[in-house]
Structure formats: C-alpha cells, structure tokens
Image: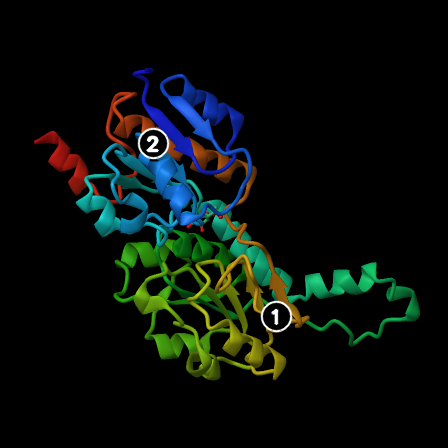
C-alpha cells in the first residue's frame, strides 16, 4: 500500500497546480465539474487525507461521519458558507479558504456588472444581435443611469468591499458604506473616503448599491421587499456576494414595476437555477457566479488551496497560509 498522502480534488483544476500537488501526494482530481451526491461525497472524503473543494460541496457533520482520516479541507473561495466550521473543528480537521488573492479581480467585476446594468449593455447587445438596429433607433432610446458624480453604497466593507470602494474615485463618486461597526479612519480614507451610515440611510441615499457581505443566517434576505422599498427608483443594485442575501422574487418585482432601475447579479438564491422572474427581465444583467474568474485570480486561488493542503499535511514546510479554524492547528501542536 502506498504511504503517500492522498488528496481529493472535487473539480477540474489547473494542470500545473495538480502537478504541484502530485510532487508530494497521490492526487485524485475529478475530471468534470458536478455536484456530488451526499453518499459519494462522504466516501471521497473518507478515502483522503486532504481535500480541495468548492462552494457546491457542502462539508458538514453528515459528510464527515465515520471519517477518521481527513486532516484538511481547502475551499476554493473566500466565502465558506458551504463549510460547517464547528463540525470540522470537532472532527479535528483544518478548514482553509482563499482570501485576498481574489479581492481586486472580484472588485473589477463588481464594476463590470454595475456599468453594464446602469448603461444597459446587455440589453442593447441583445437588441443589436437580433438585427433591430437597421429598423431605426431614436435619440432618446437606450437611456441609462450615470455613475459619475453619484453616490456609491457598499453593504459589507470587508477586503473586497474596500477594493470596490477604492475604484469609485475614478468616477468622482461619493462613497457610503454600512458594516456592523465603522472602519478605522485610515481604512475609510483608503476606501475612496468612504463614510459609515446606518443601513436605512445607505439604502435611501445610494444611487448604486453593491453587496459584498458574507452569507450567514443573519444576512439572509438582507435585501428584501422592505429594503428595496427604501431605495431610489433610479438606483442600480449589484450582488457579487451570495445568493440568498437578496430576496430574488422581491427584487424581480421591484425591477418589473420600475421601483428600481436595474440590477447586476452574479449570484442567486438556489443557483445554478435562476428565478424565472429575473430571467424574464431586460433591466437585469445576469452572470453565473464568475466575479473571481479572471485567469490570474482563479489560478492564484487554486495555488493557495494547494498550499493550504500541502502545508496542513506537513508535505511542505510552514503553516497553512489561510486557516479558518486555527484552533485545530494549535491543538495539533500540543
Ligand atoms: C467562488 C466565491 O469561489 O470566493 C468566493 O467566495 O464565491 C467565488 O470566488 C468561485 O466562483 C468558485 O465557485
């Protein structure tokens, strides 16, 4: 029997990153991206010393049941609502994520969605491709909403939120934000001179609102019918955080009834399925959870996940770079 450690990778990954893992461990990487049935997930995890997983893999007590082997689970993402950290910690398994390496690319994409939604890029392209332009276009067709000189709101001013806010300087925008507590002044200055306001003020005053908060039981439907009712009818909403933070049915109703100008959405409640009411609307830009998907960011995420696994299994020197439950490391050291 091979004494090499086994690493299971739940989805296809960059060949050079798999090769780096294979220098030190026996690697079993899935060749296709798919959702694993609970029983299959449990069996894969039980046969591995380390696992690299993604948001579609729910790692909870049931997935770890009877598992005496697994030492580390490395998530391909900064968000980790798919990991039950309490269950992993109880089982003595280290959990890791991929913070920071995706901040700038994800912030770029928030602006891509905001610009596209505000200036109707998707709808105009669909109209052009459908051959309508030669039929005629009026001077007052395709009127969008300006960004420059307006107020940008950021709900969730963590590392990605701050990267979104910094970019607002290029559009001469005022920046408001809401977090549970205001940031230190130096960070506010670095973040486009952002000012903390309470959530209702943020909703009322933002011309453009970007959601960048983590998904927790408390943030579920942080934007629902009541919150949408506070927003300006000419406002644009962007969600690059998590599906479920927005009540998609309430959002679709607001967009349909002209209570909100437009939305740019990268994440959805119940994705990969998208609420049919959203699909039916032209004033929403939809993308399949790709905000971190620049070539560089995704590669850096994969590399970081691999380093987390290799270090946690003691196959390379040093501490795993991004532990989520470091208590497991401390306990291992005693
Ligand atoms: C996903 C993300 O990880 O980092 C996160 O929290 O949501 C994304 O970067 C990525 O889309 C892979 O599913």
Quadrant in the picture for the C terminus: top left
Above or below for 169 versus 229: above
- Left or right, 196 with respect to 68, comes to right
Quadrant in the picture for the N terminus: top left
Location of residue 185 in the rendering, given as x and y in whole percent from the top left corner:
28, 59
Location of residue 79 in the rendering, given as x and y in whole percent from the top left corner:
38, 51
Q: Which residue is mark 2?
A: 47
Precedes in sequence: disc 1 or disc 2: 2
Q: Which residue is mark 1?
A: 276
Q: Residues within 10 Å of mark 2 (few under 14, many from 20)?
A: some
Q: Nearer the viewer, residue 272 or 131?
A: 272
Q: Residues within 10 Å of mark 1 (few under 14, many from 20)?
A: few
Query: Which of labels 1 and 2 is toward the front?
Result: 2
**Residue drawn 55% across the image and 80% down it:** 254
Dot label at residue 315:
none
SS state under label 2: loop
Quadrant of residue 252 in the image? bottom right
- Left or right, 129 with respect to 55, comes to right
Location of residue 235 in the rendering, given as x and y in whole percent from the top left corner:
54, 75
**Residue drawn 54% across the image and 44% down it:** 293
Whether the residue under disc 2 has CB within 8 Å of ligand 1 = no
Above or below for 109 versus 282: above
Quadrant of residue 197 in the image? bottom left
Location of residue 245 in the rendering, given as x and y in whole percent from the top left corner:
42, 67
Above or below for 27 versus 219: above
SS state under label 1: helix
């Amino acid at each position: 029997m091979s004494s090499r450690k086994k690493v299971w990778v739940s989805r296809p990954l960059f060949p050079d990153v798999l090769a780096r893992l294979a220098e030190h461990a026996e690697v079993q990487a899935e060749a296709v991206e798919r959702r694993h049935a609970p029983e299959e997930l449990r069996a894969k995890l039980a046969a591995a010393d380390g696992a690299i997983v993604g948001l579609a893999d729910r790692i909870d007590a049931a997935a770890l049941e009877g598992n005496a082997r697994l030492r580390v689970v490395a998530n391909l993402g900064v968000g980790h609502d798919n990991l039950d950290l309490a269950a992993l910690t109880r089982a003595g398994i280290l959990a890791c994520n991929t913070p920071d390496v995706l901040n700038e690319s994800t912030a770029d994409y928030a602006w891509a969605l905001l610009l596209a939604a505000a200036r109707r890029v998707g709808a105009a392209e669909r109209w052009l491709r459908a051959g309508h332009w030669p039929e005629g276009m009026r001077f007052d067709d395709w009127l969008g909403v300006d960004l420059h000189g307006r107020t940008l709101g950021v709900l969730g001013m963590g590392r990605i939120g701050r990267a979104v806010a910094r970019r607002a300087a290029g559009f001469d925008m005022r920046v408001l934000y809401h977090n549970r507590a205001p940031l230190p002044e130096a960070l506010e200055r670095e973040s486009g001179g952002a000012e903390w306001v309470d959530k209702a003020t943020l909703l009322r005053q933002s011309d453009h609102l970007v959601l960048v908060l983590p998904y927790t039981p408390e943030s579920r439907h942080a934007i629902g019918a009541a919150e949408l009712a506070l927003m300006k009818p000419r406002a644009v909403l962007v969600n690059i955080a998590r599906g479920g933070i927005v009540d998609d049915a309430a959002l679709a109703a607001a967009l349909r009834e002209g209570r909100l100008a437009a939305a740019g959405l990268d994440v959805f409640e119940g994705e990969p399925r998208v609420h049919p009411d959203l699909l039916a609307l032209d004033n929403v830009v939809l993308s399949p959870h790709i905000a971190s998907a620049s070539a560089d960011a995704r590669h850096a995420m994969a590399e970081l996940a691999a380093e987390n696994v290799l270090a946690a299994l003691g196959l390379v020197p040093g501490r795993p770079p991004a532990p989520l439950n470091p208590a497991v490391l401390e306990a291992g050291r005693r």
